[in-house]
Image (cartoon, grey):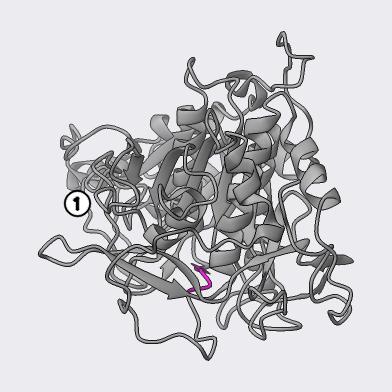
């Protein structure tokens, strides 16, 4: 069984281009529903459907095919050969055990029009071969085999055991220098801005988040399976990391931008702290679908991500396969920028010389971590990748206080965590404040505004802190 992300070559090989504009606000807001159209993107689902693959967007178990596999094989044997597009069903049992599949299935697909891609999961080797023959000229078949990891919280030498904080602090801890208190005093708290988060989830009933409606989607371990469909449910978080991130960016009592509208996709499991390109793609497609609703199409948006690939391919993965995954991830970020959405990513927690992707993509605003004394954290990743210096700038990421999961008796917990995963939502919150103040600015204009208004860190070693500390001015 093999899974691929099918991305049109016309999009993966080109740089980001502005989509259709046309608003009454100086023509600055992209229309998300028209910005992401590709000439050939619809060919993939049509072709896969003709091969017998079933749509994974349909709920529930799929019906049996009309002709059993044994009959198909006998008929083909009698003819001596099969037509080019006549698929014989077989199940490949090689490789790791994955989501159960019935022998009657040729495979499944999930079309994601807003990011211009299609996920395809083949249980038939012949269907896979025919699809590559028919679509290979126009589409990259990117194996969904390289796992992304996220920079989970690290020990900064000052942090006690997890779950040590049982209640909320009286006041926010953000220093005066960062401008958050000043923004809030002026009534700028993120209202009207949409903030998307791709992480482990969010505890929607935590006191930090319970007074708002959070649009939430759980993307399953098998995002291309009709048997395990993605679900829009009340927000939950099996790890606490996503709840902490959401609290930093948008928590009611401690968040940088407490009045944003939150859209959270759970794409990372707590046990492995890993995810796949397919799950991230499905999460992004859902976010863009939410952002593109008629009532949201011209509203400003920001997306926070704490996940990525290392610079070098992991063991057992070819360089070509790895590069394909990286190019696909970059294409997904381009789709966000094309849609007037500002992507903000954590630089990573490997220290100096460990910068990876997507932090190294020019489409992303990459964030390293400093403590509240403006000293660069030893774990904060930095480096030069393809002549691009990482990170772009810094955020507070050492012993940051925020919400985490509740206990069975409904007792809320707050923790101090450290990591670039904490610094990124701080910057995402600042971006939401800027977009709240100036909703007619494009995502790229807001990015430039943030970079131009940093607080310089002159005593920091060269290349470790980007432009400086992100602040609101």
Q: Identify the image quadrant of residue 82.
A: top left
- Residue 307, by quadrant, is bottom right
User: Which portion, as a residue range, is magenta?
Assistant: 147-152
In-front residue for pair 436/428: 436
In the rendered image of this protein, does residue 295 appear above or below residue 409? above
* Closer to us: 373 or 55: 373
Q: Does the magenta stretch include residue 150?
A: yes
Query: Where's the N terminus, which quadrant?
Result: bottom left
Q: Residue furthest bottom?
A: 157
- Give the residue number, with chain letter if any, for mark 1: 102
Above or below: residue 222 compared with residue 448: below
In percent of width and height, residue 395 lies at 66, 64
| Picture layout, residue 51 above or below residue 140 | above
Residue lying at 80% horizontally and 41% vertically, measured from the top left: 15
Q: Nearer the viewer, residue 39 or 377?
A: 377
Image check: 99 left or right of 43? left
Residue 112 in view in this figure: yes
User: For the stretch drawn in magenta, what is the main secondary structure?
Assistant: loop
Residue 138 appears in view: no
**Residue 295: x percent and y percent?**
48, 16
Q: Would you call the spot at circle 1 few (<14 residues within 10 Å), some (14-19), or many (20 or more)?
A: few
Q: Position of residue 150 (x, y in %)?
A: 51, 69
Residue 73 in percent (x, y) is at 26, 47
Label 1 sits on a secondary structure element that is loop
**For the image shown, how many numbered marks are present on the structure?**
1
Instruction: State left or right for residue 154 relative to residue 353.
Output: left
Residue at position x 76%, y 21% in the image: 28
Image point (51%, 22%), residue name = 296
Query: Which residue sits at x=70%, y=11%?
Result: 23
Q: Compare residues 30 and 317 and report the one nearer the observer.
A: 30
């Amino acid at each position: 069984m093999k899974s691929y992300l099918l991305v049109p070559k016309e999009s993966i090989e080109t740089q980001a281009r502005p989509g259709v504009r046309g608003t009454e606000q100086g023509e600055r807001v992209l229309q998300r529903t028209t910005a992401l159209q590709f000439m050939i993107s619809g060919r993939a689902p049509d072709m896969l459907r003709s091969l017998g693959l079933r749509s994974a967007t349909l709920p529930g178990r799929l019906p049996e095919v009309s002709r059993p596999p044994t009959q198909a094989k006998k008929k083909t044997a009698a003819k001596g050969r099969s037509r080019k597009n006549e698929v014989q069903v077989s199940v490949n049992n090689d490789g790791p055990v994955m989501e159960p599949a019935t022998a009657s299935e040729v495979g499944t697909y999930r079309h994601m029009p807003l990011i211009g891609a299609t996920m395809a999961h083949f249980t038939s080797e012949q269907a896979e071969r025919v699809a590559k023959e028919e679509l290979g000229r126009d589409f990259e078949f990117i194996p969904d085999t390289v796992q992304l990891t996220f920079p989970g919280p690290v020990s900064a030498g000052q942090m006690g055991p997890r779950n040590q904080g049982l209640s909320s602090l009286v006041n926010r801890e953000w220093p005066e220098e960062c401008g958050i208190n000043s923004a809030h005093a002026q009534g700028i708290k993120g209202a009207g801005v949409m903030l998307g988060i791709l992480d482990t989830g969010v505890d929607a009933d935590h006191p930090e988040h319970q007074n708002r409606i959070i649009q939430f989607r759980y993307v399953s371990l098998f995002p291309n399976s009709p048997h395990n469909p993605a679900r829009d449910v009340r927000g939950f978080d099996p790890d606490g990391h996503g709840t902490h991130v959401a609290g930093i960016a948008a928590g009611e009592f401690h968040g940088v931008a407490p009045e944003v509208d939150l859209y959270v996709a759970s794409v990372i499991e707590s046990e492995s702290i890993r995810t796949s390109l397919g799950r991230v793609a499905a999460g992004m497609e859902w976010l863009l679908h939410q952002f593109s609703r008629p009532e949201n199409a011209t509203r400003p948006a920001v997306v926070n991500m704490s996940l990525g690939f290392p610079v070098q391919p992991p063991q057992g993965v070819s360089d070509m396969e790895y590069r394909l995954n990286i190019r696909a991830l970059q294409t997904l970020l381009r789709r966000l920028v094309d849609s007037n959405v500002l992507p903000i990513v954590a630089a990573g927690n490997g220290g100096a010389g460990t910068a990876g992707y997507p932090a190294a993509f020019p489409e992303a605003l990459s964030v390293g971590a400093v403590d509240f004394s403006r000293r660069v954290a030893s774990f904060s990743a930095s480096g030069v990748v393809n002549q691009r210096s990482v990170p772009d700038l810094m955020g507070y990421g050492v012993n940051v206080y925020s919400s985490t999961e509740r206990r069975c008796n409904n007792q809320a917990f707050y923790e101090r965590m450290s990591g670039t995963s904490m610094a990124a939502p701080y910057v995402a919150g600042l971006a939401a404040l800027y977009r709240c103040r100036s909703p007619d600015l494009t995502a790229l204009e807001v990015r430039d505004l943030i970079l131009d208004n940093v607080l310089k860190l002159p005593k920091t070693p060269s290349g470790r802190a980007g432009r400086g500390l992100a602040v609101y001015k």
